[in-house]
Image: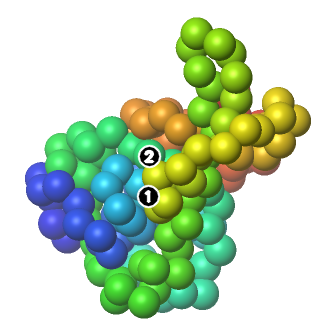
Amino acid sequence: MVRGRKQKRGDIVSIDIGNGKQFHAVALTHPLFAFLDGVFERDEPVQDVRDRAVLFKLWVMGSAAKSGRWPIVGKVDPPTVSALDGPVFFKQDRNSGKISVYDAIANAESPLSFEEAGRLECAAPWSPEHVEDRLRDHLNGISNKL
């Protein structure tokens, strides 16, 4: 387990959500993480991430792994990491209110309807605490408020 360093592409982090439960995520292109389905007990070894579904992908503030809050518990090889890439987010212009789809890999934007935006993640970094809340909500079958 590695604590206190910035995550690198392919690092697997452990996310403690309390009550002895944890989720795993894979670090993609900074600051993007792919959060994996499956809750585990604290001391279980990291399972093969290739067989696990991605719950969601979010940008996360750098403090998550760097502070040691989400310790690095494993690593996946580049082909597996590449298969997880391809995030698409929505953005809303503060001045005009116009919504666009943002392809982070291509660094490109195009117009998007409000309804279509509802199926995408917002292009904004999340705090580790808010991600942990969202994972707890997922585990409990509750719609996340954020």
Vertical placement of residue 143 versus 68, above or below: above
Query: Which residue type carries mark 1?
Result: Phe
Q: Which of the two residues, 85 or 68, is positioned nearer the viewer here?
A: 85
Indicate which disc, 2 or 1, sits on the residue closer to the N terminus.
1
Vertical placement of residue 138 versus 35, above or below: above
Which percent across, then down, holds residue 33?
44, 58
Q: Is residue 120 left or right of residue 134?
A: right
Q: Quadrant of residue 8?
A: bottom left
Q: Which of the two residues, 51 or 57, is positioned nearer the viewer here?
A: 57
- Toward the left, the furthest residue is 4
Vertical placement of residue 9 versus 137, above or below: below
- Quadrant where the N terminus sits is bottom left
- Toward the right, the furthest residue is 115
**How far is the residue under mark 2 from the one under mark 1?**
6 Å
Asked if labels 1 and 2 touch by Cβ distance under 8 angstroms, the answer is yes
Number of marks present in the image shown: 2
Q: Which of the two residues, 124 or 135, is positioned nearer the viewer here?
A: 124
**Residue drawn at x 30%, y 80% as measured from the top left:** 75
Q: Quadrant of residue 26?
A: bottom left
**Residue drawn at x 12%, y 53% as measured from the top left:** 4
**Residue under label 2:** 59
**Residue under label 1:** 33
Mark 1 lies on a secondary structure that is strand
Label 1 Cα crowd, 10 Å radius (few <14 / some 14-19 / many 20+): many
Query: Which residue type carries mark 2?
Result: Trp
**Residue drawn at x 45%, y 80% as measured from the top left:** 82
**Residue drawn at x 46%, y 86% as measured from the top left:** 80
Residue 34 in view (yes/no): no
Which percent across, then down, holds residue 120?
71, 46
Q: Is residue 114 left or right of residue 18?
A: right
